[in-house]
């Protein structure tokens, strides 16, 4: 049963669109910035290249970048070189790298908890299947 916080995906499960975990985009964004500094459009393009992060709302991306900058996780500067209008280029800060490490730890912990859940779930239903067929 889906509640108002999730959307039915049509595949018999509830979740956000394309199976995204809420908040996971922020971790991907920081990971992209560890690799190299980029302006918003480049980040949006890179996020859209992956099934895990495809279809990100540009407004969400820019709000997240502003929030990260306010929190000291990224910093930005204006790139006035090259053709076209000046673009704001974002780079991760040492605090942003620390935050990304914390995210990775959280993801590992969540993966372990999910693994324990699935192991218990599967052993329960395997037992029920054996009892019914037996």
Image: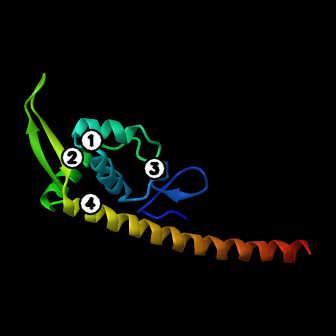
The residue identified by callout 1 is 58
Instruction: Answer with mark 3 or mark 4, whichever residue precedes in sequence.
Output: 3
Query: Image height check: is 58 above or below 81?
Result: below
Q: Would you call the spot at circle 1 few (<14 residues within 10 Å), some (14-19), or many (20 or more)?
A: few
Residue at the far top: name it: 83
Report x, y in % for residue 53: 41, 46
Instruction: Answer with mark 2 or mark 3, whichever residue precedes in sequence.
Output: 3
Q: Identify the residue shown where x is 31% and y is 55%.
A: 26
**Which label was assigned to residue 17?**
3
Are the residues tagged 2 and 1 within 8 Å (C-beta)?
yes
Viewer-closest of 37 and 84: 37
Task: For marks 2 and 4, give the one nearer the viewer.
Answer: 4
Q: Identify the residue shown where x is 45% and y is 47%.
A: 52
Query: Image height check: is 120 above or below 27?
Result: below
Instruction: Answer with mark 1 or mark 4, whichever residue precedes in sequence.
Output: 1
Viewer-closest of 95 and 53: 95
Work out how far the residue at label 2 is from the one at label 3, CA to CA, in angstroms: 20 Å
The residue identified by callout 4 is 97
Q: Secondary structure at mark 2?
A: helix
Q: Is residue 116 left or right of residue 79?
A: right
Work out how far the residue at label 1 is from the one at label 4, CA to CA, in angstroms: 23 Å
Q: Would you call the spot at circle 3 few (<14 residues within 10 Å), some (14-19), or many (20 or more)?
A: some
Q: Secondary structure at mark 1?
A: helix
The residue identified by callout 2 is 62
Q: Is residue 129 left or right of residue 14?
A: right
Work out how far the residue at label 2 is from the one at label 4, CA to CA, in angstroms: 19 Å
Are the residues tagged 3 and 4 within 8 Å (C-beta)?
no
Q: Would you call the spot at circle 4 few (<14 residues within 10 Å), some (14-19), or many (20 or more)?
A: some
């Amino acid at each position: 049963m889906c509640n108002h916080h999730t959307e039915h995906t049509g595949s018999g499960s509830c979740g956000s669109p394309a199976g995204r975990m809420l908040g996971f985009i922020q971790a991907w964004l920081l990971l992209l910035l560890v690799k190299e500094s980029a302006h918003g459009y480049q980040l949006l393009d890179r996020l859209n290249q992956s099934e895990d992060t495809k279809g990100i709302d540009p407004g969400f991306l820019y709000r997240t970048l502003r929030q990260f900058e306010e929190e000291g996780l990224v910093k930005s500067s204006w790139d006035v070189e090259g053709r076209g209008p000046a673009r704001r280029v974002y780079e991760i800060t040492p605090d942003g790298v620390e935050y990304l490490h914390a995210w990775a730890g959280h993801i590992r912990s969540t993966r372990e908890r999910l693994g324990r859940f699935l192991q218990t779930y599967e052993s329960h239903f395997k037992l029920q299947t054996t009892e019914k067929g037996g």
